[in-house]
Amino acid sequence: MPNPPPPAPRPAALTAAPATGHPTFLYSELVTELDALGAADIAFLGIPHGAGYSFREIVNDQSNMPAAMRRASDRIIRAPGRYDFDLGGPMYDNRPIRVVDCGDVAGELGDLGAHLRKAEAAVRRIRAAGAMPIVLGGDHGIPIPVLRALDKDGPITLVHVDQHLDWRDEVNGVTQGLSSPIRRASEMAHIGEIFQIGLHATGSARPEEVEAALAYGAHLFSAYDVHEHGMQKVLDRIPAGGRYYLTIDLDGIDPAIAPGVAAPCPGGLTFMQVRTLIHGLVAKGRVIGMDVVEITPQSDVNQVTCITAGRFIVNLIGAAVRAGYFDKARG
């Protein structure tokens, strides 16, 4: 009898378990087989690599951010069952919330764009399971594949916290890099209004990028607008009843509480201002996902930047749980 054909090879995994440090973020369940997410409510995903502008930047310090965030877990929250004064009780409010850590999207040395395709596929799997993706960057190029994967969730109102505008069309011929995520988002049919909050000082934006953002209809709020008039004034401009995606570049936060970034600059947003934004968005509609990006762990001080980013995530989760996000049919 002829030998039976060999079994078909299994498709390559999209993610891999963390190699070092704390095994998962915020003590969550490790699930790297994304077809087995089951009834997960929240899924953490590390996307370490973006699209570098030079060979040196392919593996930049921001690529160490997911591991640094996991290492800071016990500083961000001592244990999920502890009383959290930001939330008025334990993070999960004693409800049966299933939270998983999907590990990190792995890069491929022989295909420097593969991780971007894998990232998009991973987020699609997370959303197909009905879970809220919370992404640990990486540099600010990583929201591009994430937002592409959310095309069935539109129309999405994009809420962007950053020091910089991020509307460059290309840098050194690279169109998917850290200076371009909002420009790329504006080209996606499922992205509607864009709110950019915390802008200050200078960065990659030239006058033509500001003109492009305004021509699109992006709502630009400098950090000084927020300092002088309060975050509630910004929230009042964001339409209620929407579906929101929140991307937070930690260099948009004042370096007193976010020193570990490549471009620290005074004048950024405060923790309380961003906390008000997060709780306000949850109350207005439905936050379908979030990312935190641009931490450089080698320049962080006592893990303060990771703790700040982690506390933003805790506030989103705690507010969403209390708003009944996970008590209803997922969508």
Image: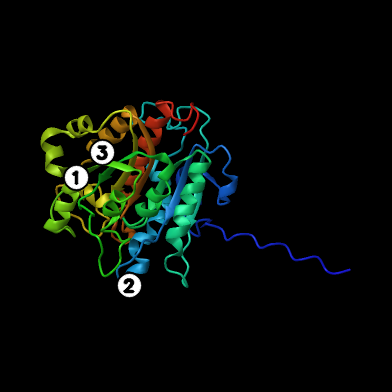
| Residues at marks 1 and 2, CA–CA distance in whole angstroms | 29 Å
Label 2 sits on a secondary structure element that is helix
- Where is residue 60, by image quadrant? bottom left
> Which amino acid, by three-letter code, is at mark 1?
Gly
- 54 shown above or below 8: below
| Residue at figure coordinates x 17%, y 56% from the top left | 209
The mark nearer the N terminus, 3 or 1, is 1
Q: Nearer the viewer, residue 30 or 123?
A: 123
| Residues at marks 3 and 1, CA–CA distance in whole angstroms | 10 Å
Q: Nearer the viewer, residue 112 or 277?
A: 112
Label 1 sits on a secondary structure element that is strand
The mark nearer the N terminus, 3 or 2, is 2
Image location (x, y in percent) of residue 266: 15, 50
> Which amino acid, by three-letter code, is at mark 2?
Arg
Q: Nearer the viewer, residue 152 or 98?
A: 152
Image location (x, y in percent) of residue 194: 25, 42
Look at mark 2 in the image and give the residue it sits on.
56
Horizontal arrangement in the rendering, residue 72 relative to residue 212 (left or right): right
In the image, farthest residue toward the right: 1
Q: Nearer the viewer, residue 143 or 253?
A: 143
Look at mark 3 in the image and give the residue it sits on.
274
* Mark 1 Cα shell of 10 Å, populated few (<14), some (14-19), many (≥20): many
Image location (x, y in percent) of residue 96: 53, 30
Look at mark 1 in the image and give the residue it sits on.
198
* Mark 3 Cα shell of 10 Å, populated few (<14), some (14-19), many (≥20): some
Residue 28 shows up from this direction: no
| Residues at marks 3 and 2, CA–CA distance in whole angstroms | 33 Å
| Residue at figure coordinates x 31%, y 50% from the top left | 185
